[in-house]
Image (cartoon, rainbow, N blue to C red):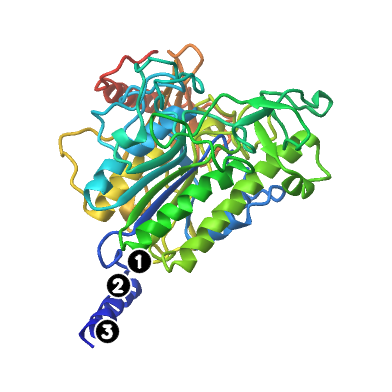
Amino acid sequence: MLLYNLVRVRLFIALVAFLVTGCTQPHPSGQPNIILIMTDDLGWGDVGFNGNDVIQTPHLDQLAAAGIVFERFYSASAVCSPTRASVLTGRNPIRVGVPTANQGHLREEEITLAELVQEAGYATGHFGKWHLGTLTTTMRDSNRGRVGDSSHFSIPTQHGFDVYFSTEAKVPTYDPMRKPVAFDTLNGESLRYGWAAIQQEQPTEAYGTHYFTHPGQPETEHLSGDNSKVIMDRVLPFITRSTEASQPFFAVVWFHTPHLPVVADSADRTMYSTHSHEEQIYYGTITAMDTQVGRLRQHLAELGALDDTMIWFASDNGPERDTPGSAGPFRERKRSLHEGGVRVPAFVSWPAGIEGNTSLSAPAVTSDYLPTLVEYLGLPYPQDRILDGMSLVDILKGDQTERSEPIGFLFGEKQSWVDDRYKLISKDDGQTYELYDLIEDPGESIDISQEHPERVEAMREAFGEWVSGFRFQVSG
């Protein structure tokens, strides 16, 4: 009876908090489950919740509708590895020494989100694409793995993850360990772009990237079919084990989709039968991934854990060039600091903690994950350690409508400084700048730098002061 009354009191307190603030208190233990989903090269316009009426993403759309959709969410860089570093550290990727893909690695001196929640009692797991270092020194693997080479060896368990099922870099999005010997070039298939799912009679060979759960022998079992399912097949048991042990969990799920090569089976291609073959396999792999997001949501619901799970979703950068991927109304694509290269689809859903069915216009960035969760969970973090992200707690609660700190971007010679309204971006020479009003001109079509020289100079000075504190060399 005492336990029954205690539960009733907690439910009453949570209800009162929701009615008063529109946002319930966190999990009674103060530890909601956390899932960070990231897609690879998914454009802002590649999802239904941002208005795409061709690519079918019903499960993502359902989660987005139940949560808060970010209208202006940015990846910290224009390519994947730097953005992933920002997610785990809350710091700009240049600051942590990961300037671009296949350069640098996540250093053990960094304080990661996984380490922080692990110390707080969370079960932690990484699943999917890692791309923050090599995963083996005993065999040739992926982009940088070499026998005896430990120069960029950096595995998830060195950074706060209890378990992992991860690849160093990209894999085909169907039958991820294999590739065809020949391609249907007349339909646009190629080793770079992708192909229809391999048929049983087709000759194949190893793709060259492996899944690892430890630095030794790579995984060899249950690696066929849709790659998003291969990943989710490992995520769901991890969640089940944690839930049955009454332990909060932190799952980082980094899908490879729709990074090239895109591969889709006939079922996922059929729903796009009126489109070109290249579009069919591109759109099909996104829908296949969406199916696995639906599977995740259903699993959480069956475990009674959905309401108390915070799910963050974003892409690591804009869509790859020369693909059917869409940046929506925004300028440029992957590898550009214009909006199409770094403004990505994103939402957060947490039924027990965040009022959903809404959207936010304030800018946010992947570097904000760590400071936001540090505040939500009350995690200790060194006061004198620089973070480039900021906590979004007040913005998510509706207590704050504008971002209080600008967002800085660095990619090669390119530089950008973004505040609530204006964007300063360097030209190709890295020395002169353009200025855009992102409220009036989100497509960055009208350079207003000549009309606002004082604003240009003020933003340049602020950007320069920010960069001056970086430990690693910054080009430009």
Which amino acid, by three-letter code, is at mark 1? Answer: Cys
Label 3 element class = helix
Tell me whether the residue at label 1 lies in contact with that at label 2, contact meaning CB atoms closer than 8 angstroms.
yes
* Crowding at mark 3 (Cα within 10 Å: few <14, some 14-19, many 20+): few
Q: Is residue 64 visible?
A: no
Which amino acid, by three-letter code, is at mark 3? Answer: Tyr
Name the residue carrying label 3.
4
Q: Quadrant of residue 423?
A: top left
Q: Is residue 266 visible?
A: yes
Name the residue carrying label 2.
17
- Frontmost residue, 266 versus 102: 266
Spatial CA distance of label 1 from label 3 is 24 Å
Label 1 element class = loop
Q: Position of residue 178 (x, y in %)?
A: 64, 30
Name the residue carrying label 1.
23
Which amino acid, by three-letter code, is at mark 2? Answer: Ala
- For this view, does 14 lie left or right of residue 411? left
Label 2 element class = helix
Above or below 126: residue 133: above
* Crowding at mark 1 (Cα within 10 Å: few <14, some 14-19, many 20+): many
Above or below 250: residue 223: above
Q: Position of residue 396 (x, y in %)?
A: 37, 55
For marks 1 and 2, the one nearer the N-term is 2
For marks 1 and 3, the one nearer the N-term is 3
- For this view, does 177 lie left or right of residue 217? right
Tell me whether the residue at label 2 lies in contact with that at label 3, contact meaning CB atoms closer than 8 angstroms.
no
